[in-house]
Amino acid sequence: MIAIDITKGKELIKEQIQMRKMTADTSKLAYKQINEEGISESQKKTILSVVHRVFLNQVKRDISLREISFRTGIDINAVSGRVNELKKDGKLQTTVKRKCTITDRLVAPVIPIRN
């Protein structure tokens, strides 16, 4: 009985590892697809435009990722990925934490980096 439980446990672990690999492979393919189709660059341009507009025209000069998602219609997971890329590219930076106007949670909003 114990040997059966150990065998089932090993099989379960193998299945979990395989599922994680499949998920990772799917994520890599999706990332490659959005880059090849130009979706990533288009999203980055849209996000950067909104951040600049808010920074220049609004009393509140920073913007949270959820606020970006709300203004652009881009899913929050995509906004997060593109904002991280824009930060790595030296185009955005995080600023002082504040409460998000949409979620009312503490966030680290972003502002453009002046070059």
Image (cartoon, helix red, strand yellow):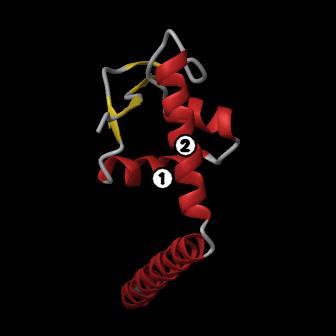
Which residue lies most toward the top here? 59
Question: What secondary structure is marked by label 1?
Answer: helix
* Circle 1 Cα neighbour tier, 10 Å, few/some/many (<14 / 14–19 / ≥20): many
Element at badge 2?
A: helix
**Residue at 37 percent of width and 90 percent of height:** 3
Residue 37 showing in the rendered view: yes
Quadrant in which residue 110 is drawn: top left
User: Which residue lies at the image location 62% right of the left edge and 64% below the top edge?
Assistant: 39
| In this rendering, the label closer to the viewer, 1 or 2 | 2
Quadrant of the image containing the C terminus: top left
Which residue is the site of mark 2?
47
Against 52, is 17 above or below? Answer: below
In the current view of this chain or complex, which residue is farthest to the right? 73
Q: Residue at x 62, y 38 (%)?
A: 69
Q: Quadrant of residue 30?
A: bottom right
User: Which badge, 1 or 2, is on the more N-terminal residue?
Assistant: 2
Residue type indicated by callout 1: Arg
- Image coordinates of residue 55 in percent, x first then y, are 47, 23
**Residue 28: where, in percent of width, then height?**
48, 77
Location of mark 1 (residue): 82
Instruction: Out of 26 and 41, give the one closest to the viewer.
Output: 41
Can residue 77 be seen at all in this image of the molecule?
Answer: no
Q: Residue furthest front?
A: 115
Looking at the rendered structure, the kind of residue marked 2 is Ile
Where in the figure is residue 74, as x and y percent of width and height? 65, 47
For the N terminus, give its image quadrant.
Answer: bottom left
**Is residue 93 shown left or right of residue 73?**
left
Circle on res. 43:
none
* Residue 28 in the image: above or below residue 108: below
| C-beta proximity under 8 Å, tags 1 and 2 | yes
Q: CA distance from mark 1 to mark 2?
A: 8 Å
